[in-house]
Image (tube, rainbow, N blue to C red):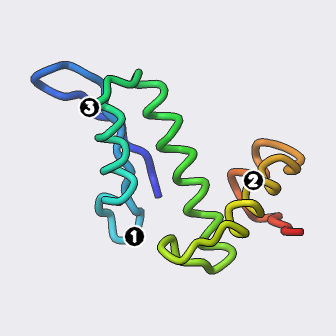
Amino acid sequence: MKVSKLRDPQTKRLLFRVYSTQPYKPFDLINDFLRHLERRSYAANTVRSHAYDLIRYFKYLTVIKINWDTVSVDNIVDYVYHLRHAKSTTETVSYTHLTLP
Protein backbone atom coordinates (compact mmCIF):
# COMPACT_ATOMS: atom_id res chain seq x y z
CA MET A 1 0.00 0.00 0.00
CA LYS A 2 1.10 3.51 -0.76
CA VAL A 3 -0.04 6.99 0.26
CA SER A 4 -0.52 9.49 -2.56
CA LYS A 5 -0.71 13.23 -2.01
CA LEU A 6 -3.23 15.15 -4.12
CA ARG A 7 -4.58 18.67 -4.23
CA ASP A 8 -8.28 19.37 -4.67
CA PRO A 9 -8.49 21.67 -7.71
CA GLN A 10 -11.51 23.55 -6.33
CA THR A 11 -10.61 24.03 -2.68
CA LYS A 12 -6.81 23.75 -3.06
CA ARG A 13 -6.92 21.52 0.03
CA LEU A 14 -4.22 18.88 0.36
CA LEU A 15 -5.68 15.36 0.22
CA PHE A 16 -4.19 11.95 0.91
CA ARG A 17 -5.32 8.64 -0.57
CA VAL A 18 -4.12 5.08 -0.08
CA TYR A 19 -3.57 2.76 -3.03
CA SER A 20 -2.67 -0.89 -3.17
CA THR A 21 0.57 -1.42 -5.06
CA GLN A 22 -0.49 -4.53 -7.00
CA PRO A 23 -2.77 -3.93 -8.78
CA TYR A 24 -2.54 -0.17 -8.37
CA LYS A 25 -6.05 0.76 -7.22
CA PRO A 26 -7.59 2.76 -4.40
CA PHE A 27 -7.94 1.12 -1.02
CA ASP A 28 -11.58 2.11 -0.56
CA LEU A 29 -11.99 1.21 3.08
CA ILE A 30 -9.15 3.48 4.22
CA ASN A 31 -9.99 6.22 1.72
CA ASP A 32 -13.60 6.37 2.91
CA PHE A 33 -12.30 7.05 6.40
CA LEU A 34 -9.83 9.68 5.15
CA ARG A 35 -12.64 11.44 3.28
CA HIS A 36 -14.70 11.38 6.48
CA LEU A 37 -11.86 13.15 8.32
CA GLU A 38 -11.54 15.71 5.52
CA ARG A 39 -15.29 16.46 5.61
CA ARG A 40 -14.91 17.11 9.33
CA SER A 41 -12.10 19.60 8.55
CA TYR A 42 -9.26 17.66 10.11
CA ALA A 43 -5.83 19.11 9.35
CA ALA A 44 -4.02 17.64 6.34
CA ASN A 45 -1.18 16.39 8.57
CA THR A 46 -3.68 14.56 10.77
CA VAL A 47 -5.28 12.89 7.75
CA ARG A 48 -1.82 11.95 6.45
CA SER A 49 -0.87 10.44 9.83
CA HIS A 50 -4.05 8.39 9.90
CA ALA A 51 -3.35 7.14 6.38
CA TYR A 52 0.08 5.84 7.38
CA ASP A 53 -1.22 4.42 10.67
CA LEU A 54 -3.96 2.53 8.86
CA ILE A 55 -1.48 1.15 6.33
CA ARG A 56 0.65 -0.04 9.23
CA TYR A 57 -2.38 -1.71 10.83
CA PHE A 58 -3.49 -3.43 7.63
CA LYS A 59 0.07 -4.69 7.05
CA TYR A 60 0.02 -6.09 10.57
CA LEU A 61 -3.25 -7.90 9.84
CA THR A 62 -1.69 -9.36 6.69
CA VAL A 63 1.31 -10.64 8.64
CA ILE A 64 -0.84 -12.35 11.26
CA LYS A 65 -3.18 -13.60 8.50
CA ILE A 66 -6.34 -11.98 9.85
CA ASN A 67 -8.93 -10.47 7.55
CA TRP A 68 -9.94 -6.94 8.59
CA ASP A 69 -13.61 -7.89 8.95
CA THR A 70 -12.85 -10.74 11.37
CA VAL A 71 -10.67 -8.79 13.81
CA SER A 72 -11.29 -9.58 17.46
CA VAL A 73 -10.61 -7.54 20.57
CA ASP A 74 -7.65 -9.86 21.26
CA ASN A 75 -6.16 -8.99 17.84
CA ILE A 76 -6.39 -5.29 18.65
CA VAL A 77 -4.84 -5.81 22.09
CA ASP A 78 -1.98 -7.76 20.48
CA TYR A 79 -1.44 -4.95 17.96
CA VAL A 80 -1.31 -2.29 20.68
CA TYR A 81 1.10 -4.49 22.64
CA HIS A 82 3.28 -4.81 19.55
CA LEU A 83 3.32 -1.04 19.00
CA ARG A 84 4.21 -0.34 22.62
CA HIS A 85 7.01 -2.88 22.74
CA ALA A 86 8.57 -2.47 19.30
CA LYS A 87 12.25 -1.58 19.59
CA SER A 88 12.12 1.16 16.95
CA THR A 89 9.81 2.98 14.54
CA THR A 90 11.41 1.02 11.69
CA GLU A 91 10.39 -2.22 13.31
CA THR A 92 6.76 -1.15 13.62
CA VAL A 93 6.64 -0.13 9.96
CA SER A 94 8.48 -2.99 8.28
CA TYR A 95 7.13 -5.96 10.25
CA THR A 96 10.07 -7.98 9.00
CA HIS A 97 10.94 -8.75 12.62
CA LEU A 98 7.39 -9.01 13.91
CA THR A 99 7.09 -10.97 17.12
CA LEU A 100 3.82 -11.37 18.93
CA PRO A 101 3.35 -12.36 22.56
- Measured in 3D between alpha carbons, the distance from the residue under mark 1 to the one under mark 2, in whole angstroms, is 28 Å
**Height in image: 101 above or below 33?**
below
- For residue 89, which numbered disc appears in the image? none
- Residue at the disc numbered 3: 39
Mark drawn on residue 80: 2
Measuring 53% from the left and 51% from the top, which residue is drawn there? 54
Callout 2 amino acid: Val
Q: Are marks 3 and 1 in contact (CB under 8 Å)?
A: no
Query: Residue 21, image x and y in percent?
Result: 41, 63
Question: Dot 2 surroundings within 10 Å: few (below 14), some, or many (20 or more)?
Answer: few
Tell me whether the residue at label 1 lies in contact with that at label 2, contact meaning CB atoms closer than 8 angstroms. Answer: no
Q: Looking at this view, name the residue that lies furthest to the front.
A: 73
Label whose residue precedes the other's in the sequence (1 or 2): 1
Give how far across and how far down residue 34 sits, in percent.
Answer: 36, 42
SS of the residue under disc 2: helix
Numbered circles on residues, count: 3
Q: Amino acid at mark 1?
A: Gln
Could you tell me residue 72's position as x and y percent? 63, 72
Structural distance between the alpha carbons of marks 2 and 3: 28 Å
What is the three-letter code of the residue carrying label 3? Arg
| Lateral position of residue 93 relative to residue 57, left or right | right
Q: Earlier in the sequence, mark 3 or mark 1?
A: 1
Q: Provide residue 74's location: percent of width, then percent of height.
A: 73, 69
Going from N to C along the chain, the mark reached first, 2 or 3, is 3
Crowding at dot 3, Cα within 10 Å, few <14 / some 14-19 / many 20+, comes out as few
Whether residue 19 is situated above or below residue 49 in the rendered picture? below
Distance from disc 3 to disc 1, alpha carbons, whole Å, reads: 29 Å
Task: Name the residue at 68% across, 61% down.
Answer: 76
SS at mark 1 in the image: loop
For label 1, count other residues whose C-alpha is less than 10 Å away and answer few (under 14), some (14-19) or many (20+).
few
Q: Mark 1 or mark 2: which is in front?
A: 2
Check disc 1 and report the residue beneath it. Answer: 22
